[in-house]
Amino acid sequence: MGYKELRFPEKSVFLITGGAGFIGSNLCEALLSMGYEVRCLDNLSTGKMENIQPFMENPKFTFIQGDIRDLDTCLKATEGVRYVMNQAAWGSVPRSIEMPLLYEEINIRGTLNMMEASRQNGVKKFVYASSSSVYGDHPVLPKKEGQEGNLLSPYALTKRVDEEYGRLYKVLYDLDTYGLRYFNVFGRRQDPDGVYAAVIPKFIKQLLNDEAPTINGDGKQSRDFTYIDNVIEANLKACLASSEAAGEAYNIGAGGREYLIDIYYNLCSALGKEIDPIFGPARKGDIRDSNADISKARKLLGYDPAYDFKKGIALAIDWYKENL
């Protein structure tokens, strides 16, 4: 079953932080299409108005321009809210190595503000974005919750701290928290621009423009690329999960493993391009291989990803062809 058949109590209000971003705007769209009331909190530091512009006329959509680093903003935004999906964060491992203090402020203090505001306002479920980066240098595949290695970046550290706060807020305050360890999410509305852009949209845009993309490292690193609709499903199912499943973190991937170099040549083929990539130095802080064991999320959240990589990448390519 996908997410469109899921049902929540009538008049449920959802708050999505980072709702003008890639994942957040897709969550807003999904919930509005299901008929629910959605609040979007975003300071537009990485989110974009164009992502939420189509929803602005919807009477069930409210946009709050504000910052999760401000507790008063978080308290106001969570008033009367039943479900919070906290997607507001700064991503990118390399950028976190350059700006560790900012990552501490946004990803740790901001998330803590949201948990505290949710606790004070009686929010029922607090679902938040974690990351596969928390596995660090642990070499074993597939990645399994409880088998984490040494962290490799400030970004990974912020997500690990969020998970510990999530655990404590369940134990100490009985706030039902669910951490979702995203594995390389891709799909519609993911930003292809900028030095910190994710690899799939960046490659697609460069190839469409007949430019040679740069692959960091030898291209033999592997990732469990996860289509956006799987992530929407995971967030919504976490909102419906039992209290017994709260206070935990869950792998959210597709359960597959793709090599970067293979993806590159598949994109070339799909776009009808013959362009050799440029190979650059490997990036500091990057995990070499990732592949999610999703059995815990299947069992406790009912997560059952409908999109494998092949199905997802075809949809993503179609979207970028139309929208770039």
Image (cartoon, rainbow, N blue to C red):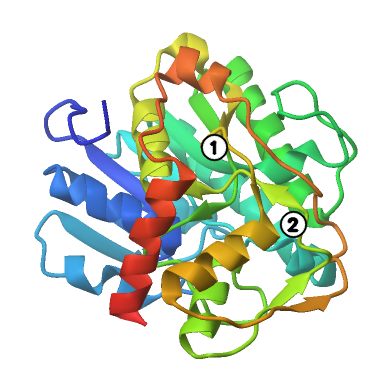
Helix, strand or loop at disc 2?
helix
Kind of residue at disc 2: Glu
Q: Residue at x 44, y 40 (%)?
A: 308
Q: Residue 254, can we see it?
A: yes
Mark 1 vs mark 2: in front = 1
Examine the image and state in which quarter residue 260 appears.
bottom right
If the image is split into quadrants, where does the C terminus sit?
bottom left
Going from the N terminus, do you reach mark 1 or mark 2 first? 2
Q: Residue 18, can we see it?
A: no
Crowd class of label 1 (few under 14; some 14 to 19; many from 20; radius 10 Å): many
Horizontal and vertical percent position of residue 191: 48, 73
Kind of residue at disc 1: Gly
Q: Which residue is mark 2?
A: 104
Q: How many marks?
A: 2
Question: Residue 134, which numbered label?
Answer: none
Q: Residue at x 27, y 32 (%)?
A: 2
Horizontal and vertical percent position of residue 275: 61, 83
Q: Which residue is mark 1?
A: 253
* Closer-to-camera residue (153/212): 212
Residue 89 vertical position relative to residue 94 in the rendered view, above or below? above
Extreme residue in the bottom direction: 210
Horizontal and vertical percent position of residue 103: 72, 61
Helix, strand or loop at disc 1?
loop
Examine the image and state in which quarter residue 320 appears.
bottom left
Q: Residue at x 45, y 33 (%)?
A: 126
Extreme residue in the top direction: 244
* Closer-to-camera residue (302/44): 302
Residue 33 vertical position relative to residue 282 in the rendered view, above or below? above
